[in-house]
Amino acid sequence: MQYEKSLNKPYLVDGHMHLEHGDLSEEYVMRFVEEAVKKGIDEIDILDHTHRFVEFRCCYDHLRQYKPQEEWLDGQYNLCNSIDEYLELIDRMKQKQLPVKVKFGLEVCYTPDTEDMIRELLSHYHFDFLTGAVHSINHILYDLPFSRELLWNRVSADQIYHDYYEYVMKCVDTGLFNRIAHPDTIKLFNIYPKYDLKPTYEKLAQKIKEKGMLAECNTGCHYRYGHKDIGLSDELLRVFVENDVPIITASDAHEPEYVGNYIREATERIEACRNEYQNI
Ligand SMILES: [Zn+2]
Ligand SMILES: [Zn+2]
């Protein structure tokens, strides 16, 4: 854990939040900054999803074969802004003196089928960081209200977890990303596989470490979906700590008021896990 020398307080980072329910405006970004100040967060990292931007439309065509997904894609702010608007906003924000550190990136929805498109598109832009994320398996989104009907009621949990981690590992292998988003959100509905996930976690940890990436401890599952874990599961957190994987805390805030949500608790959990491991 990083400490600010004078205060001896942990350096708190919220590494994942979205502007996607608001305009790409300076005023809207400032609401996130103000919330970070209020909650004592030292750094915020803003990353809108690629599904906000028209340039990435081709990466979502495969989801349109299912009606609820097509409707979801056509919803508010999805595929409606140009990435240039976002880049211009970033430029304007970087001219300002802000009370907390602010970075700007993208959360890139990864699938093996769209990897080539993603690689080509990303080669045109520069961001402070890029976060790779798996949100769909075999062209079906796993984390939306309609996902139960489309996916969870039709496919076994063993198969879903197997496919999910195959995608997550491929996402890491691409070398395109600095960070891997929420590496166990597949647990969001509290449905678990029958097989032991430990060997998968070990393999994933080694890959993330090899690529020099950060793994998120994302608290979104806790307060957005009511899952008991404040971020990573105890088991995956432990595997990351044992493999010396760098971990970044993240709220996945979709509204300014959720900036910094459970970041202090997640930071303390990670620190406690590291201390426990070192003391064995
Ligand atoms: Zn995500
Ligand atoms: Zn997100």
Image (cartoon, grey):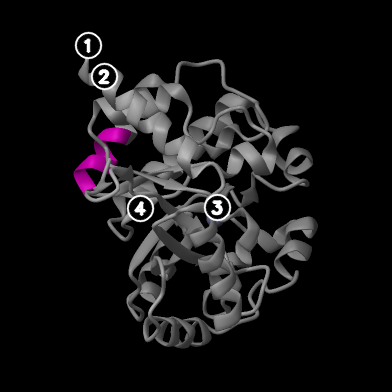
Look at mark 4 in the image and give the residue it sits on: 179
Place of residue 245 in the rendered image (x, y in percent of width and height, measured from the top left) = 27, 37
Mark 3 vs mark 2: which is more N-terminal? 3
Cβ atoms under marks 1 and 2 closer than 8 Å: yes
Q: Residue sitting at 44 percent across and 82 percent down?
A: 93
Query: Taking 67 as reference, is 240 left or right?
Result: left
Mark 1 vs mark 4: which is more N-terminal? 4
Look at mark 1 in the image and give the residue it sits on: 280
Check disc 3 and report its element: helix, strand or loop: loop
Q: Residue sitting at 60 percent across and 76 percent down?
A: 28
- Which image quadrant: the N terminus? top left
The circle drawn on residue 27 is none
Distance CA(mark 1)–CA(mark 2): 6 Å
Q: Magenta residues? A: 205-211
Q: Residue sitting at 38 percent across and 80 percent down?
A: 97
- Which image quadrant: the C terminus? top left
Look at mark 2 in the image and give the residue it sits on: 277
Q: Which amino acid is tagged 1?
A: Ile
Look at mark 3 in the image and give the residue it sits on: 252
Q: Is residue 62 magenta?
A: no
Distance CA(mark 4)–CA(mark 2): 24 Å
- Label 1 or label 4, whichever lies nearer to me, is 1
Classify residue 35 by image quadrant.
bottom right
Query: Taking 13 as reference, is 141 left or right?
Result: right
